[in-house]
């Protein structure tokens, strides 16, 4: 009975941790894409404020609009986009503006993180409600006016009700922080913050809690110590130095590159596995966090905004004029305290350590996969909670390794919450693999033990080489599609009426709606396939470059395809597609593999913008159909 209760308790704890990490990743997804703008705000404040390096009253006038309007609206825009693409983004920004005006002088970061996604959610639900009720030919006018009307209504409601409410909540939170600071007990917050940090919750704490509250403090004095509680690189440096001096084997060997990436690159996730490998080191983390906060209080130190990434370079860049001693002492003393506590536990752990006689082979590699891979591995994603720091670095390393091995595989990085549906293999740190498996249970997964050139990369290379040998009948294209070399009869999948030459089509959404209309009229798909086309654009930019876009439905909408078909849209003057200009759009509804022969021709024949230009100038649908169906493949 006791054992059963214990297991249930562990499941509940794990479930809570996973949900909290997922929530943190969502918050990070709103903030991290806009970090550049926050850094710009921090630098302008640090340099041109009255107490800055080079005070300038005129330039300092930018500070307040950036803080009050631009930054919250960027968060609201991004939050809405995460829920419902560009329409959600516009709704998110609109509702955030009402929030800002209604909230008075309080910086509405917390409110933007709530109302931005809510705005995207509301317009998404409205579109779902009316999508099958719009008369043909009125799609564009309904889309524009519905967004304007719904956005305007929620903007007004946000202004009247939500803005004042968020102002009160923010004031209460700011007052609570002030209460803690006034009583000198802020250092004790490290008891809760540091364990959460090494469980990869650093982003939600930093950007979701500390940064918004720190901005309230920074408005009065130009800086805040709250900005430095998470980004302080001294704590991780102390952990890594303890391993370098007292550890042995692989852990010791990994330290030099980890120090470089952590301290100068600002990617703190690097040192978390070192702590998790010896849970007693959480005590060292806590001790270093307490020491850092005490030093910041004594020296009255803080930064103008949260340094991101948390490198020593970012810390010094965002340190106000005359506060460099506080920065050096905060980082240095927290490093020393962390090192002294960590050294005791690391030394004890390696007291009886013996070097292995031979290299340990990663024998559990095949069992790390969730689902068996059928077909060639063509796209890999390295994922983490936010998708911007450690995963980007690790993806770059894996990409280079596979390229040097002569393996043509696309390697991308992503937040776990935003993993595309078209990947074949998902790579995550061992602490995040279970979360990733729940996010994408129908995909193959593998864990890595470190973000720095982990030994599992060798296993991944061997797996891909073996996979490609087993799938020799496939040609892996540099873009997205994997095509089987064979000849098909394509005359029934590219109807002459589905080759559209129209210079009045100017944007992506018009194309997607027209493509789906043609598919439905021709009996190729159900009307719901349009949702799949939009979903795919959220997962993967189908603008392939060179003026060519190949939109197709998301995997989840495969059941909406009744038979294979293609729609071509040509505008020699260009169509705006996800921020770029395209002239040739090839819409795909692929039930089987009949379309792959034409698609292969398109991907190989139109490998330059000049070739696309020559093709769109033909101007004769019958001639275009003949070329695509009969031209020999190179």
Image: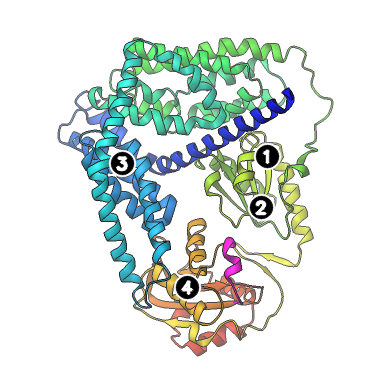
> Is disc 3 in contact with disc 4, using a CB cutoff of under 8 Å?
no
Residue 442: image tag: 2
Question: x and y percent of residue 283 in the render?
Answer: 57, 14
Give how far apart the Cα atoms at labels 2 and 1 are: 16 Å
- 558 inside magenta stretch: yes
Disc 1: which residue: 447
Q: Looking at the image, is mark 1 or mark 4 earlier in the sequence?
A: 1
Give the prevailing secondary structure in the magenta stretch: helix
Q: Is residue 626 above or below residue 177?
A: below
Magenta stretch in the rendered image: 555-564
Residue drawn at x 68%, y 25% is: 251
- Residue 380 vertical placement versus 543 (above, below): above
Identify whether 598 is placed above or below 190: below
Q: How far is mark 4 from mark 2, CA to CA? A: 30 Å
Count how many numbered circles sit on residues in the image: 4
Q: Quadrant of the C terminus?
A: bottom right
- Residue 335 appears in the rendering: no
Q: Which residue is mark 4?
A: 585
Looking at the rendered image, the disc whose residue lies closer to the viewer, 4 or 2, is 2
**Position of the N terminus by quadrant:** top right
Q: Quadrant of residue 452?
A: top right
Question: 374 or 117: which is nearer to us?
Answer: 117
Does residue 56 appear in this view?
A: yes
Which badge, 3 or 4, is on the more N-terminal residue? 3
Instruction: Give the residue number, with chain letter if any, for mark 3.
Output: 72
Residue 588 drawn in magenta: no
Q: CA distance from mark 3 to mark 4?
A: 36 Å
Dot 3 lies on which element? Answer: helix
Q: Which of the two residues, 125 or 347, is positioned nearer the viewer here?
A: 125
Residue 49 in the image: x percent, y percent? 21, 28
Q: Residue at x 65, y 49 (%)?
A: 441
Q: Tell me the element at label 2.
A: loop
């Amino acid at each position: 009975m006791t054992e059963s209760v214990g297991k249930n308790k562990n499941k509940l704890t794990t479930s809570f941790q996973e949900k909290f990490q997922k929530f943190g990743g969502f918050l990070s997804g709103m903030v991290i894409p806009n970090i550049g703008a926050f850094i710009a705000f921090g630098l302008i404040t640090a340099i041109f404020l009255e107490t800055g390096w080079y005070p300038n009253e005129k330039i300092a006038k930018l500070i307040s609009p950036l803080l009050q309007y631009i930054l919250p609206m960027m968060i609201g825009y991004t939050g809405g986009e995460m829920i419902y693409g560009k329409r959600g983004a516009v709704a998110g920004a609109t509702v955030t503006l009402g929030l800002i005006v209604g909230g008075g002088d309080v910086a509405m970061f917390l409110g933007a993180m709530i109302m931005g996604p809510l705005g995207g959610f509301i317009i998404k639900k409205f579109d779902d409600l009316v999508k099958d009720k719009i008369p043909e030919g009125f799609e564009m006018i309904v889309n524009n006016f519905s967004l304007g009307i719904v956005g305007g209504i929620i903007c007004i409601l946000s202004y009247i009700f939500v803005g004042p409410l968020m102002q009160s909540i923010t004031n209460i939170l700011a007052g609570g922080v002030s209460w803690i600071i006034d009583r000198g007990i802020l250092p004790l917050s490290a008891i809760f913050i540091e364990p959460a940090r090494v469980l990869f919750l650093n982003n939600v704490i930093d950007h979701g809690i500390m940064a918004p509250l720190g901005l309230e403090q920074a408005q009065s004095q130009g800086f805040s110590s709250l900005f430095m509680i998470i980004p302080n690189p001294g704590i991780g440096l102390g952990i890594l130095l303890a391993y370098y001096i007292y550890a042995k084997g692989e852990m010791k060997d990994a330290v030099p590159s980890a120090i470089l990436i952590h301290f100068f690159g600002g990617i703190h996730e690097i040192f978390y596995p070192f702590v998790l490998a010896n849970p007693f080191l959480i005590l060292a983390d806590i001790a270093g966090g307490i020491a850092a906060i005490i030093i910041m209080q004594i020296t009255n130190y803080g930064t103008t905004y949260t340094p991101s990434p948390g490198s020593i370079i970012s810390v010094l860049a965002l340190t106000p004029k005359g506060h460099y001693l506080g920065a050096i002492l905060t980082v240095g003393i927290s490093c020393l305290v962390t090192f002294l506590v960590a050294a005791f536990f690391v030394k004890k752990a390696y007291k009886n350590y013996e070097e292995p006689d031979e290299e340990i082979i990663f024998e559990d590699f095949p069992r790390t996969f969730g689902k068996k891979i059928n077909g060639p591995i063509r796209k890999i994603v390295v994922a983490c909670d936010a998708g911007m720091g450690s995963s980007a670095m690790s993806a770059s390393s894996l990409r280079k390794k596979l390229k040097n091995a002569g393996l043509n595989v696309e390697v991308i990085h992503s937040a776990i919450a935003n993993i595309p549906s078209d990947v074949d293999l998902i790579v995550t740190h061992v602490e995040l693999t279970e979360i990733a498996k729940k996010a994408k249970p129908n995909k193959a997964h593998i864990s890595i033990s470190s973000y720095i050139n982990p030994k599992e990369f060798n296993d991944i290379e061997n797996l891909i080489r073996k996979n490609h040998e087993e799938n020799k009948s496939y040609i892996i294209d540099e873009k997205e599609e994997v095509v089987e070399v064979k000849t098909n009869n394509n005359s029934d999948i590219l109807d002459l009426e589905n080759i559209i030459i129209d210079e009045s089509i100017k944007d992506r959404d018009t194309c997607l709606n027209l493509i789906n209309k043609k598919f439905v009229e021709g009996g190729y798909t159900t009307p719901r396939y349009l949702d799949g086309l939009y979903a795919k654009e959220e997962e993967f930019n189908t603008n392939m470059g060179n003026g060519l876009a190949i939109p197709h439905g998301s995997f989840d909408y495969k059941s909406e395809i009744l038979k294979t078909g293609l729609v071509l849209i040509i505008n020699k003057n260009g169509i705006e597609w996800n921020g770029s200009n395209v002239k040739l759009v090839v819409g795909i509804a692929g039930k089987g593999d009949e379309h792959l022969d034409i698609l292969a021709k398109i991907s190989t024949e139109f490998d330059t913008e000049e070739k696309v230009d020559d093709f769109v100038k033909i101007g004769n649908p019958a001639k275009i159909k003949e070329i695509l169906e009969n031209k020999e493949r190179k």
